[in-house]
Amino acid sequence: MDKPNIFHVTHWKAGSQWVRGVLRSADPARIVVGKDSRSWFFKDPIVPGGIYTPVYATYERFRQIVPPGSNDRTFAVIRDPRDAAVSWYFSLLYSHAADYPSVIDARPRLQRLDKREGMTHIFQGHLPALIEIQRTWLESGTRIFRYEDLVADQHGVFAQIFDHCEIHLRPRWQRMIVNRHRFSLRTWWRFGREDVKSHLRKGIAGDWRNHFDDELKERFKSLYGDALIQAGYEKDLDW
């Protein structure tokens, strides 16, 4: 029987390279590498049985490339948009390589702004696309995994991802792969200390509480409060 295509769909700042690394170690021969890193998924023909990771696209845009009923095992990884916003702010300000137009445009602007103004810029200029990706996949009925659950139970959640994707590995090999890519191993030299200039700055859930003041909280609620409730990150606007 032919192996299904695997599509790891996500948005920015949700551990995309972490998940990609695990999938690549699990079945390296099937990983699809595009010729154009910015738009490869939308331009190149789909490779039968290939693993596509990561794919940044709304559900509707994805289904223009991969029609419903295709032989695919698709899953989406999402993250609390508040933590994603904080991570995005520090990446654009310090750590992201300045080889994308968005980084080239954003970095000097963020350097001129104070933190509150910079975070507001992220809310208004960068988060709308992330929120739209989250919304469409949450409404699609596709299997959703949360970044926060991956951080809390790496072995358990990656086991679910492997099972969903029909990647069959011996339990011992599966554990070795997940251990090889665990976040703490990649940042062992820091011993839990934050390095705002590192692309692996922190990676924990709930870090937004250390960076949102009351004004930023109210601004985020007004823009994306309903999205947080839809995604299950809050029950109401009383946070």
Image (cartoon, helix red, strand yellow):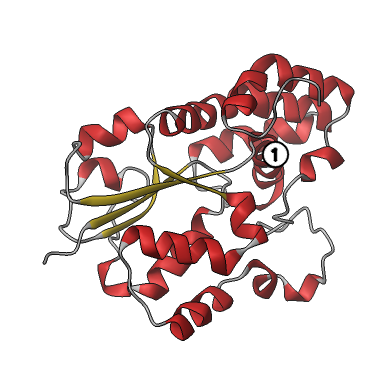
Q: Which residue is mark 1?
A: 89
Q: Percent from the top left, x then y, of residue 66?
A: 21, 40
Residue furthest toward the left?
Answer: 1
> What's the residue type where badge 1 is placed?
Tyr
Quadrant containing the C terminus is: top right
Q: Percent from the top left, x then y, of residue 141?
A: 38, 35
Question: Residue, x 77% and y 75% (percent of image)?
Answer: 189
Is there any visible trace of residue 114 in the rendered image? no
Q: Secondary structure at mark 1?
A: helix
Question: Residue, x 71% and y 14% (percent of image)?
Answer: 222
Q: Is residue 157 above or below residue 230?
A: below
Question: Residue, x 66% and y 52% (percent of image)?
Answer: 95
Left or right: residue 193 versus residue 26 is right
Q: Residues within 10 Å of mark 1 (few under 14, many from 20)?
A: many
Q: Is residue 42 above or below residue 153?
A: above
Question: Residue, x 78% and y 39% (percent of image)?
Answer: 208
Occupied quadrant, residue 131: top right
Occupied quadrant, residue 4: bottom left
Left or right: residue 223 versus residue 49 is right
Quadrant containing the N terminus is: bottom left
Count of residue discs? 1
Left or right: residue 31 versus residue 194 is left
Is there any visible trace of residue 40 in the rendered image? yes
In this view of the protein, which residue sits in the foreground, 165 or 64? 165
In this view of the protein, which residue sits in the foreground, 112 or 136? 136
Q: Percent from the top left, x then y, of residue 71?
A: 17, 50
In this view of the protein, which residue sits in the foreground, 201 or 209? 209
Q: Percent from the top left, x then y, of residue 10?
A: 46, 44
